[in-house]
Amino acid sequence: MVAMRFRQAIVSALADEMRKDPTVMVFGEDVAHAEGPFKTSEGLLAEFGPLRVRDTPISEMAFTGAAVGAAVMGMKPVVEIMFMEFLGVALDQLVTEAAKFRYLSNGTLSVPMVVRASCGSGLGFGSQHSQTLENWVAATPGLKVIHLSDSQSAYSLMRAAIQDPDPVMVLEPRALYGERGEVDTSITMKIGEARTIRSGKEITIVSLGQMVNVCRGAIEVSGIDAELIDLATIVPWDKKAVIESVKKTGRLVVVEEAPESGGWGSEIVAAVTAELFKSLKGAPFRITTPNVPVPHSGILEARFIPTQDDIVRQLKHAIATGEKPKTWWQVEGISQ
């Protein structure tokens, strides 16, 4: 076991795969000489040289498209999108091209590429650079989507993504880049497999990204015997793990750092409700952000995302009554 910051775990995963496989290459804005805007490619240029670690122009569509072509021709490109919001100008290359080549070629072509993007709030970057936009890519057949939550998943799932024969979107909560955690480099993790962080009997909590740590803290202070699942992969999500957990607890809450409308947690709640309706002890529900832009104010931003205290409040209400709790903005009379 080695203590690594979240960003260091990403660097280590990239370096280990590049040492193992000469077809792996990295490119994006400022990834080479500046070693990445969040230092997630630190040391890679020095070790692997400018042919495999490349700075690109500020044109996400162009270098994502270049990655698609490189992947089809036998390379394994890892593309960095500085902020996930910038993915918008590259969605055509990812959603229409990379995710469809295997289907359009009747299985003769694969696109083994990874698109990394920082996401999420907590650093005061404002409404245009603090969003969590999994739903942009979660409804795209042919594309796998994972969301990292700690140093171990950053290392193990990054390697799994690079090794995958199909395009993988990797979301990295930028608020976690400086967080430390233990990493066992011998541990492998599979795309599509959730992690049970804590076993419990009263309620199942499903989360991912930086919300996993918030949920862990809520469980510790509440005294509730909750089972915490780090979903890790949004597409394909681990339905079996979630269903088996809810069979045991009879209750489900999904905690998301994303707006209430259109979140990935809706899929989880719908599937569990449909399969386990008669055995549920209470209504499955979601804890999300409100349907407003991420505030720039630090005070408002901290209130915007699900907090430890509010998660505790909603867990206790759900267990006591079997009913869906009110959101914090409903409790405070801000919005219905």
Image (cartoon, helix red, strand yellow):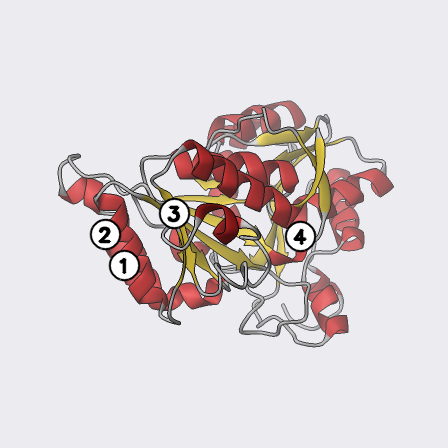
| Secondary structure type for disc 4 | helix
- Amino acid under label 4? Leu
Q: Position of residue 105 (x, y in %)?
A: 13, 41
- Which residue bears the numbered disc 1? 65
- Depth check, front residue: 226 or 69: 69
Q: Is residue 199 shown left or right of residue 293?
A: right
> Between marks 2 and 3, how big is the CA–CA gap?
13 Å
Q: Residues within 10 Å of mark 3 (few under 14, many from 20)?
A: many
Q: Earlier in the sequence, mark 2 or mark 3?
A: 3
- Which residue bears the numbered disc 4? 176
Residue 222 seen anywhere in this rendered image of the structure: yes
The answer to whether marks 1 and 2 mark residues whose Cβ atoms lie closer than 8 Å is: yes
> Between marks 4 and 2, how big is the CA–CA gap?
32 Å
Tell me what residue is drawn at x 65 percent, y 42 percent: 150
- Amino acid under label 1? Gly
- Amino acid under label 2? Gly
> Between marks 1 and 3, how big is the CA–CA gap?
14 Å
Q: Position of residue 330 (x, y in %)?
A: 69, 65
- Amino acid under label 3? Met
Closer to the camera: disc 1 or disc 4?
A: 1
- Among the 4 quarters of the image, the one containing residue 154: top right
| Secondary structure type for disc 2 | helix
> Between marks 1 and 4, how big is the CA–CA gap?
29 Å
Q: Earlier in the sequence, mark 1 or mark 4?
A: 1
Tell me what residue is drawn at x 63 percent, y 63 percent: 121
Tell me what residue is drawn at x 73 percent, y 30 percent: 202
Q: Which numbered circle lies on residue 25?
A: 3
Q: Position of residue 185 (x, y in %)?
A: 60, 29
Q: Position of residue 100 (x, y in %)?
A: 22, 47
Q: Where is the N terminus found, in terms of image quarters?
A: top right
Tell me what residue is drawn at x 25 percent, y 40 percent: 74
